[in-house]
Image (spheres, rainbow, N blue to C red):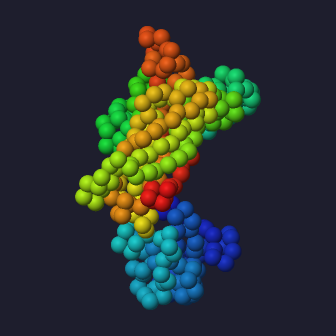
Amino acid sequence: MTAPAAGWYGASFFGPGVPGTPDRTDSAMASYRINRGDQTFVARDVAELKLWAASGKVFVDDLVQAQGTNRWEYAYEVKELAGLVKKRSAASLALDDAPAAPASTGVRKLVIALCFLGIVAAFGVVLKVFMNPPSPEQLLLTGDGPNALQDRDALLTQSASLRAQPSATAPQVEALVKDARVSLVSKSGEWYRVQSQAGNRGWVTVGEVAPAYVFTEQAHSRLDPIFNPERYLLLNAHTWDIAEDSPKRGTERKTLFTFNISNSTDYWMDQVVVRITFLDKDGRTVANRDVQVADPIPPRGKAEIDNVEVMVDIAAVPNSRVRIVGARAHEKTPPNAPGAPATEGAPEGGAGGGAVGEVVMGDPADG
């Protein structure tokens, strides 16, 4: 066991600077040195040592040396202190553990040097920011600042996978990190098609990005119909009738739907899909029928859809619900629009999945 530094003068438990006593050969009158870390205490005799132990001033892992010997013992090994030393503090070592060896001087110096360098580097960064603070324009994400997002840009609100298809199980094209910038290309249901800064195109969910255009009124009014066109198509149902010229086919009868759609935007709309949902008497969905509008709907115009035939069991599905579930907006006239040049193309727009202008109709037999 490595002995503490020599010298019999140290601090007392009852006050600083109490010196030790000269060498004595009588163990009862011998003084004792107690070492705890870098502190040394001196008990004048065994009686004082026992008093300190009984009062909890000596811990079981303190080192004790009797005067006139070169042997250091843990307090719990000193026979005079048997049953007197108290349990160690929470910071003490276990009884069967040797005291931890102090770190070498070289290691301590290296740690101190690294800490100093870290502090200097951190101070340098803070000083640079303090001396060259960013301008308010540099901090803006919208507007004309150098770091501002463009209207079709978006920020990743969390780390995400750029998928090859609008599906959570599709292969990953690229791993995107939080706050990365992407460019919006199109939208399908709950997925945006985007282009990353690396030039890769793929799909992310609407919850994983924050489009820049939603933060400015002018950009929102111009671009939201591109990415969410179904929100701007208003559907009004007119009739759901049983066809008079159709006999029953088992339990089914031919019925006819008639409705129109209004386009409230300045864009041409095509690939418009209307979904008819048939409900039982308790309002539960029994079946869906999707109907695609054949002709594009002009800006600020309407489309009339007449005589959509559906064979249904009226007794089983006395009610229906009609809603728009898809559309695509064109910033240019689509090639299949009336009067459009045959060579004119259309940029990618958006197809959505929301219900706008939803109307619930009753039993067609009731008129």
Foreground pick, 141 / 298:
298
Q: Is residue 239 above or below residue 314?
A: above
| Residue beneath the point at 68% across and 33% down | 216
Q: Quadrant of residue 215?
A: top right
| Residue beneath the point at 52% across and 33% down | 303
Q: Quadrant of residue 115?
A: top right
| Residue beneath the point at 53% across and 51% down | 359
Where does residue 249 sit, x and y in percent of width and height? 26, 54
Foreground pick, 339 / 189:
339
Q: Can residue 227 be seen?
A: no
Q: Is residue 279 above or below residue 358?
A: below
Taking the view exactly as shown, the residue that stands out farthest to the left is 250
Q: Is residue 81 above or below residue 202?
A: below
Where does residue 47 sit, x and y in percent of width and height? 55, 88
Looking at the rendered structure, the number of numbered marks drawn on it comes to: 0
| Residue beneath the point at 68% across and 69% down | 17
Foreground pick, 181 / 107:
181
Q: Quadrant of the N terminus?
A: bottom left
Where does residue 219 sit, x and y in percent of width and height? 65, 29
Where does residue 46 sit, x and y in percent of width and height? 52, 85
Q: Is residue 245 above or below residue 3?
A: above
Q: Can residue 144 be seen?
A: yes
